[in-house]
Amino acid sequence: MFGLLINEKEIKEMEYLIKREMDEILFDLRDERIDHIVKRTMEERYKILFTLFRRVASPHECLKYMRRGKKDRKKG
């Protein structure tokens, strides 16, 4: 386990970068041209990013990016 000491400005920057990456993944997951194997890898990456996001974002912001089930995965 590692510790990290960052200020509020750095937290906001991390939050912004993670949100941007998760938005891109969500957009790509809706693309039917992308193979399901690639999408599975993208889903794993999304889970890792969301775990990081939970550490820096407010619970309200986390709710916006929480994926619940297959219904959400089909719509994106």
Image (cartoon, rainbow, N blue to C red):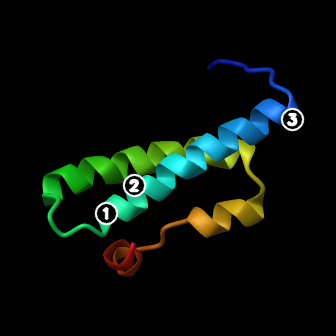
Mark 3: which secondary structure?
A: helix
Along the viewing direction, whichever of 13 and 67 lies nearer the viewer: 13
Residue 41 is situated, as x and y percent measured from the top left of the image, at 26, 47
Amino acid found under the numbered disc labelled 3: Glu
Residue 66 is situated, as x and y percent measured from the top left of the image, at 55, 65
**Residue matched to label 1:** 29
Q: Is residue 15 above or below residue 34?
A: above
Along the viewing direction, whichever of 53 and 26 lies nearer the viewer: 26
Task: Say which label, 1 or 3, has the lower sequence index.
Answer: 3
Residue at position x 47%, y 72% in the image: 68
Residue at position x 43%, y 50% in the image: 46
Mark 1: which secondary structure?
A: helix
Amino acid found under the numbered disc labelled 2: Ile
**Residue matched to label 2:** 25
Amino acid found under the numbered disc labelled 1: Leu
Residue at position x 66%, y 60% in the image: 62
Q: CA distance from mark 1 to mark 3?
A: 31 Å
Count residues near mark 2 (Cα–Cα under 10 Å), then give few for <14, some for 14-19, many for 20+: some
Q: CA distance from mark 3 to mark 2?
A: 26 Å
Q: Quadrant of residue 26?
A: bottom left
Quadrant that contains the C terminus: bottom left
Q: Are marks 1 and 2 in contact (CB under 8 Å)?
A: yes
Residue 58 is situated, as x and y percent measured from the top left of the image, at 78, 55
Count residues near mark 3 (Cα–Cα under 10 Å), then give few for <14, some for 14-19, many for 20+: few
**Residue matched to label 3:** 8
